[in-house]
Amino acid sequence: MTKSALQIARAAYQPKLPKALKGHVKAVAGAATQSVADQEAIQKLFPNTYGMPLIKFEESSEATSFPAMNVGVILSGGQAPGGHNVISGLFDGIKKLNPESRLYGFLMGPGGLVDHKYMELTADIIDEYRNTGGFDIIGSGRTKLEKEDQFEKGYEILKELGIKALVIIGGDDSNTNACVLAEYYAAKNYGIQVIGCPKTIDGDLKNDMIETSGGFDTACKTYAEVIGNIQRDCNSARKYWHFIKLMGRSASHIALECALQVQPNICIVSEEVEAKDMSLDDIVTNIAKVVADRAAQGNNFGTVLIPEGLVEFIPAMKRLIAELNDFLAANAEEFAQVKRSEQRNYIIRKLSPENSAIYASLPEGVARQLSLDRDPHGNVQVSLIETEKLLSEMVGAKLAQWKEEGKYVGKFAAQHHFFGYEGRCAAPSNFDADYCYSLGYTAAALIANGKTGYMSSVRNTTAPAEEWIAGGVPITMMMNMERRHGEMKPVIQKALVKLDGKPFAYFAEHRGHWAMSTDYVYPGPIQYFGPSEVCDQPTKTLQLEQSK
């Protein structure tokens, strides 16, 4: 296997660990917990794993001997930088407790557990993947673990391999599955512990005990580098407006963090759009106004950052999509008979007046995406909507109208970009390499202490890694009830951008200046080698959140 110079150098990097995990460790139980909402309903569903205390690991002078244990690990959901380091940390953690311990990886996500597809992860294999991006050591998948027969099929293989603990590395849905599985195995007295580890580049799995999720730091630094390159190009050619869509369907954490790093002319935050009940036209008008104001200064160029899930946060669009979903589900056969050229008019005639007007205002391509491309559940595939093109087309139309009215004198030409997969498997930054390794090591300590239904937690992350606080948080503490496919289900509450939080407040304070002055920042590539103030910085989001 041919390796790049970077791969060879990174293989030698030794991730940093919190001081408390370096020697003998003791678990200190904190206060009992309760779920963030719907306490009664969650407690009823999770009688065996609800209300458990927070756990904090501290240094101990007492050596404890641990029996050898077999542990399973699953990578679940979308890829995120640092997943391999969670597995490396878990491997090193269980081997330190007892060199005879063994680690088994289930292949291609939770489906590997159900279908009994696995491999033993030995030191030789682990060493190939330390500090590398991607999930290719065992692959990932999106199978949901929610049915009893899946739990039982999983139990068969865990019993056969003598596995006493299972670690699931994933986002909010994957860790919800981990919690449900932990409860099921506890209720059945199967003697199998289940531990979750937080990873998602979207950054929406976070709370007081989970300060950030593995992969967010690297993905944002990767995107910020490329946006910085585009801004340098933009400022050189001075003739294009770049509309840049960024991953993050359910929250705008990536867009906000990238904005804090690169200082674009415009960044839309979905949560603000929803809170202010903004329409699509409001958003378009705001962008067009900045374009016109910059043109008046002779600057016919700029950058706009757009979160992937924006359309679902515009209240009027949300209502349109809901009515479209219901209408097309109820009239699928009739709609299938309508000639392609007539489908748009057919829908305009059938919708309520408010939704009909919005649908009619959309560019043809977007209207088609809304009405034709459904997912297996019959819902609009919002991630397929090219929001960056939708906005630039509508901005262009508004500017043309203003030109006729004598309100705009510039030239408007747009370029479009979507940064998504480019960031999901990047080689982890020093921060993510250290943080994810610590999460895996902490998971091993939770297993050694007999815990189940916990998520690995590493806090105080703006301090040097030595001072990080490792422990565990009961997954039930993060849960609430939400409607999914028509029924109420327990799920981990998604963390959206807080409009009263310090990161958004800082952005809101500076965005007016960034809009008019070309005040771009060019972060450059993720730095591994060089001074600590360049290499080991946590995200701007964490720095602002934890600033005193």
Image (cartoon, rainbow, N blue to C red):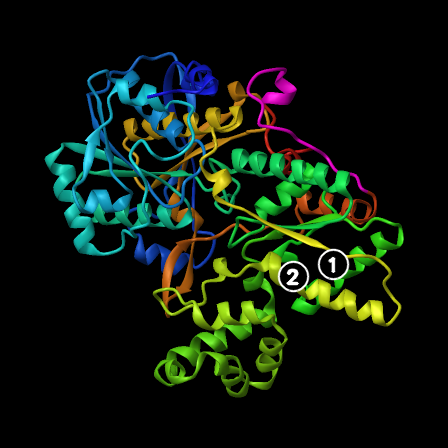
- How far from the left and from the top, in percent, is residue 196? 35, 39
Query: Which mark sits nearer the N-terminus, 2 or 1?
Result: 1
286 falls in the magenta region: no
Q: Which residue is mark 2?
A: 391
Q: Residues within 10 Å of mark 1 (few under 14, many from 20)?
A: many
Tell me the residue at 49%/73% (across/down): 322
Q: Is residue 277 left or right of residue 491?
A: right
Q: Secondary structure at mark 1?
A: helix
Tell me if residue 449 comes above or below residue 533 in the rendering: below
Q: Secondary structure at mark 2?
A: helix
The region drawn magenta spans 518-535
Q: Disc 2 versus disc 1: distance between alpha carbons?
A: 9 Å
Q: Nearer the viewer, residue 296 or 107?
A: 296
Residue 104 sits in which quadrant?
top left
Q: Which residue is mark 1?
A: 287
Tell me the residue at 61%/15% (across/down): 530
Q: Which mark is residue 444?
A: none
- How far from the left and from the top, in percent, is residue 327? 44, 81
Tell me if residue 17 comes above or below residue 538 in the rendering: above
Q: Residues within 10 Å of mark 2 (few under 14, many from 20)?
A: many
Residue 354 in sight in this render: yes
